[in-house]
Image (cartoon, rainbow, N blue to C red):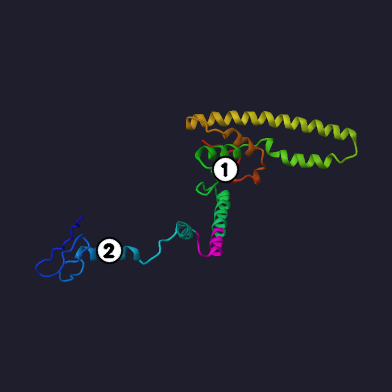
Amino acid sequence: MLRRRKTTETPADGRPEAHGSTAAPAGGTAPSAPDAKGASGRRDRSQGKGVPTPRRKDQEAARRRTLVPEDRKAARRAEREAAAAERRRQREAMITGDERALPQRDRGPQRRWVRDFVDARTGVAEFLLPVVVLYIFLMMVPSRQVQVYLMIALYVLVAVIVVEAFLITRRVRRGLTERFGQAEPGTGFYAVMRALQFRRLRLPKPQVARGQHPR
């Protein structure tokens, strides 16, 4: 059998024809400009921004660090001085009756009226503490009869104080309702607790004399 012999066509310039997309153009020119630009862009992205991204733990630590004073000893000393100044202001207010520095439980026009009402009267309840101290000493007397009398006297005193506390609560609530329209909660108990204290030991200090009832 006869085989066909492949013939290769040769162009006019004497060079064989290039096949496929990988053939270089004539004259050996460099790659196109877009390809070079893409390569440089990939190189820039791989290099990054030159500064490492801070971790979340480091960011939170930096934010917390701004809230904590650098000199903790000075901060504690300043807090102690501020607390001492506040206590001095409250002690002075307890003596002068300045409501701006009084504790919250003693502030307000109704509490001031209650204090003036209690301080203006003379009651049995304010002598409870001295009587109890005297009772303790007298109970050391080795006489059964004396001890029985002292016990009866103490019971009578307690009963009188209970009745007096009930009357003080009623009068305080009635007086506050007449002057302020409505009594604040706890004013009756506040009045009774102040009436049970010896006048010289009351805080805030009494601002009215005995018999000088508030209007």
Could you tell me which secondary element the residue under label 1 belongs to? loop
Magenta segment main secondary structure: helix
Residue 44 lies in magenta, yes or no? no
Decide which of tag 1 and tag 2 comes sooner along the chain.
2
Q: Quadrant of residue 38?
A: bottom left
Question: In the rendered view, would you say 75 is above or below 214?
Answer: below
Mark 1 nearby-residue class (10 Å; few <14, some 14–19, many ≥20): some
The residue beneath circle 2 is 41
Residue 71 lies in magenta, yes or no? yes
Whether residue 68 sits left or right of residue 53 in the image: it is right
Residue at (52, 37) in percent of width and height: 110
Whether residue 18 sits left or right of residue 12 in the image: it is right
The residue beneath circle 1 is 208
Which one is in front, 194 or 38? Answer: 38
Coordinates of residue 122 in the picture (x, y in percent): 65, 37
- How many numbered discs sit on the rendered protein? 2
Q: Is residue 115 visible?
A: yes
Which one is in front, 211 or 91? Answer: 91
Which one is in front, 50 or 182? Answer: 50
Residue type, mark 2 in image: Gly
Whether residue 142 sits left or right of residue 22 in the image: it is right
Residue type, mark 1 in image: Val
Residue at (82, 42) in percent of width and height: 137
- Magenta extent: 68-79
Residue at (67, 38) in percent of width and height: 196
Coordinates of residue 119 in the picture (x, y in percent): 60, 40
Coordinates of residue 190 in the picture (x, y in percent): 60, 37
Which residue ends up furthest to the left in the rendered image?
12
Coordinates of residue 148 in the picture (x, y in percent): 85, 32
Q: Quadrant of residue 17?
A: bottom left
Q: CA distance from mark 1 to mark 2?
A: 90 Å
